Structure formats: structure tokens, C-alpha cells
Image: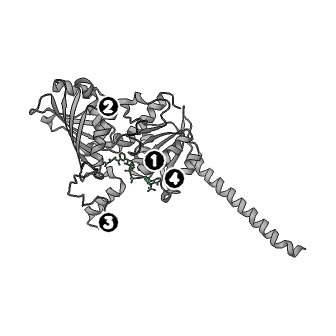
Amino acid sequence: MFLCEKPQLISIVIETLSKISNIYIILLRCSKINIQRFAAMKNSIKVAVVGATGMVGRTMLKVLEERNFPISMLLPVASERSVGSTVRFNEADVNVVSMEEAIAQKPDLALFSAGGDTSLQWAPKFAEVGCTVIDNSSAWRMHADKKLIVPEVNGAAIGASDLIIANPNCSTIQLVMTLKPLHDAFGAKRVIVSTYQSVSGTGKEAIDQMEMERKGVDGKMVYPYPIDRNCLPQCDVFTDNDYTKEEMKLTNETCKILGDKSVHVVATAVRVPVTGGHSESVNVEFEKAFEVDEVKRLLANFPGIRVQDQPELKMYPMPLYAAGKDEVFVGRIRRDFTRENTLNMWIVSDNLRKGAATNAVQIAEYLLANGRW
Ligand code: NAP
Ligand code: 2RA
């Protein structure tokens, strides 16, 4: 009797041990999630950062930290490759979790920067649990029922039912910030933009490509040609009309944010061997006459814009000095003497900050201030 019951006993022991180890794993996961809890502040919320290991995601963590955004629990999410690794936030190592684990925690807010396909697949799943998603990819920007927001320009367009909110493309944000006060005053008719976009705009693999080239080492090529000591008149892929997607984003997103389809924007987007910070040479034709001093005054008074324009002192915006800053810098402001009511200017901003992370966090701050949580 005892002999024949022994295998059964062994299987009961194994089953019990396995249950204990499962409980142990769950407790371990919970303990990791405990590490991600932070001292509660007023209106503290659970925040997921999707793409937390990427260029934009890491900047989001930095910006959330710097601006003391009230977070009760942080859920950094990345691809399966990174689950279990850690990111640094508020002097703690916080575990990267999977999409499923983050959704199970029912976050209040998710800041997405993990590419368009990831957003299309996962943003609705976060929204289903009542989470507000602010998405940095191009996935939702031109959807008729999704808002495309730069808080200083059209923050008031956000409604209570907007759960997936799109963050515009980096090159568009710095353009619309500058156009908004001038469009309101003089009516922009036609905008010709040439961009000088940094390598960080393509993501961390592009930085690696440029660094490898500088070291003379062969490595993965993200661009079709070398980027160091070169300029590529191609940002993103070509569309049917021979403009690139980046160029068409400038055309379409600008009209959507300004709420005015009559503004004609045409762009040439160029990738340059600069690590961070996008620059734009912009020519704007207005309906109404303007004085250059009035243009400078309107720009200087607009929140988030810094005018740097003293040619006699060689003062103008440059990406090297815009790095790490949240403002949009404008200089070389001058009349186009070849055309009536037309202006030239040079706009520079840190593409990872106001062009992505800072704008997304500002949208979240706007929602917080307006009682979303
Ligand atoms: P990146 O440096 O290449 O980082 C991509 C991030 O997405 C990483 O955290 C990566 O995780 C994660 N990811 C990739 N596939 C995933 C998946 N299937 N599930 C979950 N996470 C996944 O790229 P980035 O420059 O930060 O750009 C991210 C997004 O922001 C893009 O949509 C881009 O268009 C947009 N954006 C970028 C800028 C810019 O200036 N760079 C500006 C505005 C908007 P792993 O580390 O695990 O691979
Ligand atoms: C770039 N559009 O190519 C990207 C950043 N969002 O710079």
C-alpha cells in the first residue's frame, strides 16, 4: 500500500513545490512592481512609458523627472528583448515590463514612443482599460477623430473623450510653434521649409551608424548612404508624389494643428551629420503686411519661443546649443526682399525634447491641470 502510494506522494510534493515556486515568482514580480512605486504626491497617477529604452523614451523619463510629474507608479515598457532590464528614474532602477504586465496595472497615462505599428496594435488596448495614451508615432496623427496637439498652439482642442492623443512630428512642432503667432496676426499663405535634421531623429541605431563611421568601423547601416560628412536629401521613405513621408508630415500636420487647410506648406527634409537638434530654414508669405520688429515681438511673447537674433553679435540659433533645452529658438528673422509680405527665419529645437518628449509631457500636464485625473 505504502509502496504504491509513493509515486502519488512524490507527485503531490512536486505539485506543491511548483505552486510555491509560482507564488514566489508572482511575489518577486510584485516586489519589482513595488520598486516602481513612488512617494504619492497630490493627484499622483500610474504612468506607463512605452519605448522607455529608446531615444525618445529615455528623454521622456528625464523630462518627467525634471518636471516633477506626479507619478505614483512608473511602468517602463519596451520590446520583449528588454523586459527584465532596468531604466533609471528618480534615482531608482526600475524594471522594464511587457505590454501585458503594464496593461494589467491599469495605468492612468501611457506615453508611447515605440514606432507606428506598436502604437496601432497596443494604444487601443491601453485605452480599453481607461488609460489616456499620448502617442509620439505617426500612427494616429492624421486620423480624423484623433487630436494632434501642441499645447501652446491648440491644447484647448482636447476633449474629455479623447483617450488617444497624437503628438506631432518633431520637425512640425518647431514649425507650428513659430507659425502660430504670425499666422494669427498676418495670415500665413505659403510656407517653404528646408530642414536640416539630426541623426537622433532616426533613433538610437542611426546614432550608432554615425559613431561607427567616425571610428572607421563597419556596422549596421540604417541610412542608404554614409551620414558622416554627408547630407541626405531623404528623411523617411518616399511617397507616391516623390516627396518623403517626413516632408508630407510637415505639409499635412501643420494644417491640422493650425486648423487651417488654406496654409500651403511645401518642404525639403534633409538629414545632416548632427547628433541632436533639428534646424529649419523657413520662408513664409503672409496675406497682410508686417513689420519685422512686430514679428520679433510676437515671437518673443509666445510661450516656449526664444528669439536669438542679433546678427551684429553673430547671435543665431544652433543645434549644438539647443540640445537639452525645451524651447524653440528662432533667429535670422528678416524680410524676403524678393517678394511682398514675405519673411525668412531660421528655427532650431531639440527634436527629442520639444520635438517629442517635452511636448508629450506638456500634453499630460495640460490634462492634469484640466482635471483628467
Ligand atoms: P528608438 O531609439 O529606436 O527606440 C525605440 C523604442 O521602442 C525602444 O524602447 C524599443 O525597445 C521600443 N520598441 C520597439 N519595438 C517594440 C515593440 N514591438 N514593443 C514594445 N516596444 C518596442 O526610437 P526613437 O527615436 O526613440 O523613436 C520612437 C518613436 O518616437 C518613433 O515612432 C518615432 O517616429 C517617434 N519620434 C521620434 C523622434 C526623434 O526625434 N527621435 C521625435 C518624434 C517622434 P527595445 O529597446 O527593447 O528595442
Ligand atoms: C526624424 N521624423 O526623422 C523623425 C523624428 N520624429 O527626424
In front: 27, or 198? Answer: 198
**Are the residues tagged 3 and 1 within 8 Å (C-beta)?**
no
For mark 3, what is the residue?
219
Relative height, residue 220 to residue 115 (above, below): below
Residue type indicated by callout 4? Val
Ranked by sequence position, the earlier of labels 1 and 2 is 1
The mark found on residue 96 in the picture is: 4
For mark 1, what is the residue?
120
Spatial separation of the CA atoms under disc 4 and disc 1: 21 Å
The extreme right residue here reads 1
Spatial separation of the CA atoms under disc 3 and disc 4: 27 Å
Residue type indicated by callout 3? Gly
The mark found on residue 277 in the picture is: none
The extreme left residue here reads 338
Spatial separation of the CA atoms under disc 2 and disc 4: 37 Å
Task: Left or right? Give the position of 248 relative to 79.
Answer: left
**Are the residues tagged 2 and 4 within 8 Å (C-beta)?**
no
Spatial separation of the CA atoms under disc 3 and disc 2: 42 Å
Q: Name the residue rendered at 55%, 48% in the picture.
A: 102
Residue type indicated by callout 2? Leu
Task: Left or right? Give the position of 97 relative to 228.
Answer: right
In front: 15, or 163? Answer: 163
Relative height, residue 163 to residue 81 (above, below): above
